Image (cartoon, coloured by chain):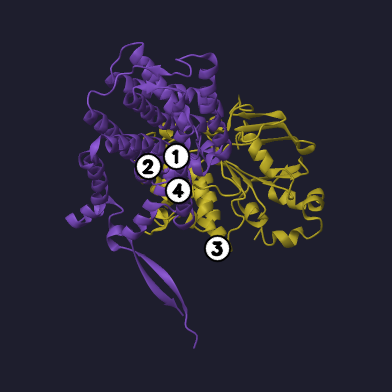
Chain colours: A purple, B yellow
């Protein structure tokens, strides 16, 4: 007799099936099954500034949250609308410069400049990206990558907005606690906001644009309109990140158009789990501190960084959160197939 | 049959580079009828649909819907006027469950105006309306089928889903691009009454088909295309009897064999 092959069997937990529809929640146990992971994330992020030693690491958390906003924007556009956008740096730069100008030239406080830069910056980015919206997939990626490079060179060549020196003397936040909780609050708000959005009826239309834009047109809807809306939402997240950044650094310069802001969020999304939104945030909270820890190694840190990334892509290409979700929702056991 | 056609197609011509896909095709569609379009492979059947529904731009020619020129309108405007289509290669939203597939067309301006299929101008909760439409089109309401991911549905259900997506808009005309192909005999035999019911509901259907036996059972008139030109137009019996059609389409005298017992 030949023994059968061993294989792993995955079975959904009963509680998972029942909790798919909220009406089926019968007990506190089932309710906590759904809410605990979410509460853990919120509580974890809110307590981070309290438990971390010193200002340095608190600042790292702020920067990680700014990257998280960008990663959310990337994940939302790429996995729910089908636009692979490498223009994260363009969003940061636009939002950053707008906040800087509003603050230094018009004397508005950060409370005003950040929301204004978010909305105006998103409108500006959307307007400029409008001609590229008919493009799909990798073509949109290539064109959107050009935008930050283009903006950087324009500022440099025309010597506007302080040229290569940038804009100096921007107000900082009133205290480091305001800074921390403003950034963390905005990240959580956008995280749960986009999660809600993609499950609403209009979110389903956006996901339809990704799956099959021809069918959307055959249903009597203008795809460009929905893509415009999605780009506005995504660039609003990026612009808000940029506005936070200039108030944290008290300086705005062409390095805000640096490609780091386009690339790192993508790496974080891959590590955290693409298409999960929360995974993008978690990925940033892991990657940004790692990149800080590796700073001691000087230029060698890029090598370490690349090795970590490659390891993830080869061994856990699904991403941390997708892996975690599977373990949380399913039993796994070895069975013998005869 | 009303003398005034709901859709007038005049001399549409389409060239893909040097290839003349359509060469001056004209025909009328009357309100409430089922018009079949047949023809050998590559004769331009799907191109006709693509040209009328605006998915590809015509080289020349005009299309009038209820007397209005829709020749230069984009596809979503044409769909908004009530001319919908299914796709030959089925295009559901694969990552969504079947009933959420219908939430998307129900979100369109036309569905909001009309309330969707059977809707009396007022649209309820889109998910509920979606499941209602799926039930009418043959998804078992109390089973798991409407809640399954579209990617896991078999072909028969996907074809119905395509039709349901059109119905969600409460259309005036549906262009069905090979809705019978790839289905088993039992699936077809349940699809035919569905088509007849849509006609009774007052929806005009234009059906492109290769399954002639089933098409001839439901179609009021049949148009034959060959090499991008209209060969003839007439009742099923007239088309079957026509010598030129036999030659172009079937290449032999085997038409009676292919059609089989269409008349009884």
Residue B243 in the image: x percent, y percent? Answer: 82, 51
Is A47 in front, or is B101?
Answer: A47
Specify whether residue B176 is in view: yes
Of badges 3 and 1, the one in the foreground is: 1
Q: Nearer the viewer, mark 4 or mark 2?
A: 4
Nearer mark to the viewer, of 3 and 4: 4
Camera-nearest residue between B3 and A258 = A258
Work out whether mark 4 precedes mark 2 in sequence or the reverse, and give the earlier one. 2
The residue at which mark 3 appears reads as B186
Q: Nearer the viewer, residue B177 or B5?
A: B177
Labelled pair 3, 4 in contact (Cβ < 8 Å): no
Observer able to see residue A27: no
Please indicate whether residue A214 sits to the left or right of residue A273 in the image: right
Q: Disc 2 sits on a residue from what chain? A: A
Give the x, y percent position of residue A218. 54, 38
Mark 1 — residue? Answer: A264
């Amino acid at each position: 007799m030949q023994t059968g092959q061993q294989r792993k069997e995955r079975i959904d937990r009963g509680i998972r099936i029942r909790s798919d529809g909220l009406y089926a929640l019968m007990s506190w146990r089932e309710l906590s099954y759904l809410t605990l992971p979410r509460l853990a994330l919120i509580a974890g992020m809110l307590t981070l500034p309290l438990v971390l030693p010193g200002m340095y690491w608190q600042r790292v958390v702020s920067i990680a949250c700014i990257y998280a906003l960008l990663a959310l924007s990337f994940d939302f556009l790429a996995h729910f609308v089908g636009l692979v956008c490498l223009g994260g740096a363009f969003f940061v730069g636009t939002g950053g410069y707008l906040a800087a100008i509003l603050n230094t030239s018009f004397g508005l406080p950060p409370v005003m400049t950040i929301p204004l830069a978010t909305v105006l910056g998103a409108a500006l980015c959307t307007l400029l990206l409008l001609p590229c919206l008919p493009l799909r997939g990798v073509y949109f990626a290539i064109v959107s990558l050009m935008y930050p490079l283009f903006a950087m060179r324009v500022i440099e060549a025309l010597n506007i907005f302080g040229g290569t020196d940038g804009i100096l003397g921007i107000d900082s936040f009133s205290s480091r606690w305001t800074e921390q909780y403003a950034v963390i609050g905005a990240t959580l708000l956008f995280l749960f906001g986009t999660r809600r959005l993609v499950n609403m009826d209009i979110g389903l239309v956006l996901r339809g644009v990704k799956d099959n834009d021809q069918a959307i047109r055959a249903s009597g809807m203008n795809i460009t309109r929905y893509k415009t809306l999605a780009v506005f939402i995504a660039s609003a997240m990026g612009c808000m990140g940029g506005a936070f950044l200039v108030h944290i650094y008290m300086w705005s310069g062409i390095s805000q158009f640096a490609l780091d802001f386009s690339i790192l969020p993508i790496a974080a999304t891959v590590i955290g789990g693409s298409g999960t939104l929360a995974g993008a945030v978690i990925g940033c909270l892991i990657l940004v501190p790692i990149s800080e820890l590796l700073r001691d190694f000087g230029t060698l840190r890029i090598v370490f960084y690349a090795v970590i990334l490659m390891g993830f892509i080869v061994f856990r290409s699904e991403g941390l959160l997708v892996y975690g979700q599977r373990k949380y929702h399913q039993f796994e056991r070895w069975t013998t197939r005869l | 049959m009303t003398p005034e056609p709901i859709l007038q197609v005049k001399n549409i011509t389409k060239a893909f580079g040097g290839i003349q896909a359509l060469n001056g095709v004209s025909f009328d569609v009357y309100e409430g009828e089922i018009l079949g379009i047949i023809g050998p492979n590559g004769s331009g059947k799907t191109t006709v649909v693509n040209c009328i529904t605006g998915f590809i731009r015509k080289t020349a020619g005009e299309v009038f819907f209820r007397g209005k020129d829709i020749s230069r309108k984009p596809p979503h405007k044409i769909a908004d006027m009530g001319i919908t289509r299914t796709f030959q290669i089925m295009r559901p939203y694969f990552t969504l469950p079947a009933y959420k597939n219908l939430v998307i067309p129900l979100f369109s301006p036309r569905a909001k105006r009309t309330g969707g299929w059977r809707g009396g101008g007022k649209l309820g909760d889109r998910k509920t309306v979606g499941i209602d439409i799926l039930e009418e089109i043959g998804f078992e309401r109390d089973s798991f089928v409407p809640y399954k991911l579209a990617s896991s549905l078999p072909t028969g259900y996907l074809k119905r889903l395509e039709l349901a997506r059109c119905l969600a808009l409460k259309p005036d005309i549906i262009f069905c691009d090979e809705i019978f192909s790839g289905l088993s005999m039992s699936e077809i035999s349940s699809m035919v009454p569905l088509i007849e019911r849509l006609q009774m509901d007052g929806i005009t259907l234009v059906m492109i088909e290769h399954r002639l036996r089933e098409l001839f059972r439901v179609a009021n008139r049949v148009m034959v295309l060959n090499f991008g030109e209209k060969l003839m137009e007439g009742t099923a019996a007239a088309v079957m009897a026509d010598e030129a059609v036999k030659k172009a389409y079937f290449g032999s005298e085997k038409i009676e064999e292919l059609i089989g017992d269409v008349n009884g």
